[in-house]
Amino acid sequence: MCRTVDAVTTPPFDLLRPGRTITGMSAVLLPYLDPDTPDLDGLAAHLERTLAAGLVPAVNMDTGFGPSLDDDRRAEVLGIARDLCAGAEFVAGAHVDDAPGDALDLDRYHQQVELIAGHGGTPILFPSHGLGALDEEAQVAAMAAVGERCDRFLGFELSRAFHPAGFVLSLEGYRDLLAIPSCVGAKHSSLERAPEWDRLRLRDRVRPEFMVLTGNDLAIDMVCYGSDYLLGISTFAPDLFAERDRRWAAGEESFHQLDDDLQYLGRFAFRTPVPAYKHSAAQFLHLRGWIRSDVTPRGAPTRPGSDRAVLAELAGRLGVLDPGVTV
């Protein structure tokens, strides 16, 4: 097997796709009433908002604290998504609860994928310590083995800024991922533009129908170059992301201002430590009056209360909060 795929260092202007219809997937925040009690009614309401906006909801992702939930809670969230989506597409994280040094538990991945598919969702293979510790060829082989036992799934490249088990494939490894028939797309969360541009060029040559799902919350304009998205920042404002996507498809100049304002929000929320963006999301959704509390689960990283004033200013700029509101 040839293992050489050249990265392209030229500017990405050849990739620009004006007027393209964007597929938007949004990782839905799981809100909490207190550090030990998930707000499942709040989750259901936010799932409904995401669906109403026309985005594909993704549950049990990092934004939904999927890696830290137990099996019973993940199954409960899956059931809520199944009932609310009522046949509409949704995505769910397939997790293996392991620890550094553990071997790959492929049977566990199979079980999780089957559970999600049985609820009507599309599984996305969340990195585990066992999978992340393998060499790249073995990682892709493991994903291919999962793909042999399901109709469709999504791959997942994840920077370790988000999760210690994360990994990002080389371009050669990505080409091998494209060769798995049941892998219909992959979320790319390296937080870097150039590797994603290279993936788009490779996708366009090798398998044009494959979805490159940007997970770059620091560069949400990757959709201009042919990426679709599965983002955490979109849970702050699924309504505004859907409107931004509509403007791109319609060729409206106002796309760029709305994209800039949403990116400002993303840059603020996804600053170091990156995992604390989930608390930023809770603060923002609470300011919008969409959830009852802005607390996070016990042990999750938090943002200072002073962030609320900045988030309120950004919400006012986006037109979803009275600029004069007191926080």
Image (cartoon, grey):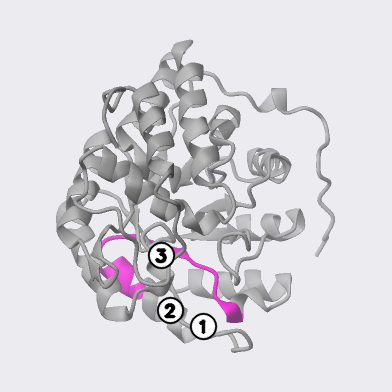
Which residue has dot 3 on it?
93
Q: Report the disc number at residue 106.
A: 1
- Range of the magenta residues? 114-130
Residue 310, position as x, y percentages in the image? 43, 35
Amino acid type, mark 3: Gly
Query: Quarter of the image holding residue 308?
Result: top left
In this view of the protein, can residue 86 be seen by the observer?
no
In the rendering, at what x and y percent does residue 240 appear? Answer: 35, 29
Please name the residue shown 30% across and 32% down the image.
239
Q: Secondary structure at mark 3?
A: strand
Above or below, 195 against 136 in this view is above
Q: Amino acid at mark 1?
A: Leu
* Image vertical order of residue 205 relative to residue 137, above or below: above
The answer to whether residue 93 is left or right of residue 324 is right
| Secondary structure state at the residue bearing disc 2 | helix
Residue mark closest to the camera, 3 vs 1: 3
Query: What numbered label is drawn on residue 195?
Result: none
Q: How many marks?
A: 3
Q: Which mark is residue 110?
A: 2
Q: Earlier in the sequence, mark 3 or mark 2?
A: 3
Give the percent coordinates (x, y) of residue 37: 22, 70
